[in-house]
Amino acid sequence: MQTDVFNAMWQFLLSYNVTDISSDYNTMKAYMQNLWFGEYPRSSSYPVLSSSGWEHIFLGEWKTDNTVDGLHNWVQFHELEKTKDINYYGYMEYEGDVLPTIQYAWESYIKPEGSFILGASVEFNFALLSLCYLTKPGDYGCQFTLNNYKVAVTSYEEDYNGGKYISTAYPEDNTN
């Protein structure tokens, strides 16, 4: 939160009077920490506090049906590929050097389709996904152009015990 990228996003949100955004650093930090790192159960059939938006989006999770859930970050994908924990099956779509839509296996778990912004810093992804979630959530809710490619971010929230948390946020091709 102390990066120039985050501060630019924060100032943008303040300038547009986005609900729940505070101009006080400590209040904003607590809000973002809860939004991203607050735990909630990922499934009603397994009501254990076992997930967070950060874990889902930036680290990835395994589902009981042997699929990968989340993992919308190229840095984590790269690290797992270096250790040979990921078997890259190939791409389904590829928007230049910006947005691959790929398929892979992470150990014995399959990701039938996933995407991320290639080469973006974690700080950029954190700020962008936060901005999209806070201003234009939903299917293809946040649409923009990045390096001349049309991109959309889909994001959803999780309501749990009176709190609101980022459930998922991921980029996807927006040329259709």
Image (cartoon, rainbow, N blue to C red):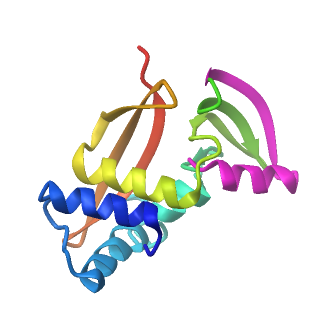
Q: Residue at x 63, y 24 (%)?
A: 96
The magenta-colored residue range is: 72-95
Quadrant in which the C terminus is drawn: top left
Q: Residue at x 30, y 58 (%)?
A: 158
Residue 152 magenta-highlighted: no
Locate residue 64, reporting x and y percent: 59, 52
Residue 127 shown left or right of residue 17 in the figure: right
Quadrant of the rendered image containing residue 79: bottom right
Residue most toward the bottom? 26
Residue 37 shown left or right of residue 133 in the figure: right
Locate residue 157, reporting x and y percent: 30, 54
In the picture shown, does residue 50 fall above or below 74?
below
In the picture shown, does residue 18 fall above or below 173?
below
Residue 92 magenta-highlighted: yes
> As rendered, which of 117 and 68 lies closer to the eye?
117
Residue 130 shown left or right of residue 13 in the figure: right
Q: Residue at x 36, y 56 (%)?
A: 130
Quadrant in which the N terminus is drawn: bottom left
Q: Residue at x 41, y 57 (%)?
A: 127
Whether residue 41 is visible, yes or no, is no
Locate residue 160, reporting x and y percent: 27, 67
In the picture shown, does residue 78 fall above or below 89?
below
Locate residue 85, reporting x and y percent: 82, 52
> As rendered, which of 96 and 163 lies closer to the eye?
96
Residue most toward the top? 176
Quadrant of the rendered image containing residue 60: bottom right
Numbered circles on residues, count? 0
Whether residue 105 is visible, yes or no, is yes
In the picture shown, does residue 169 fall above or below 14?
above
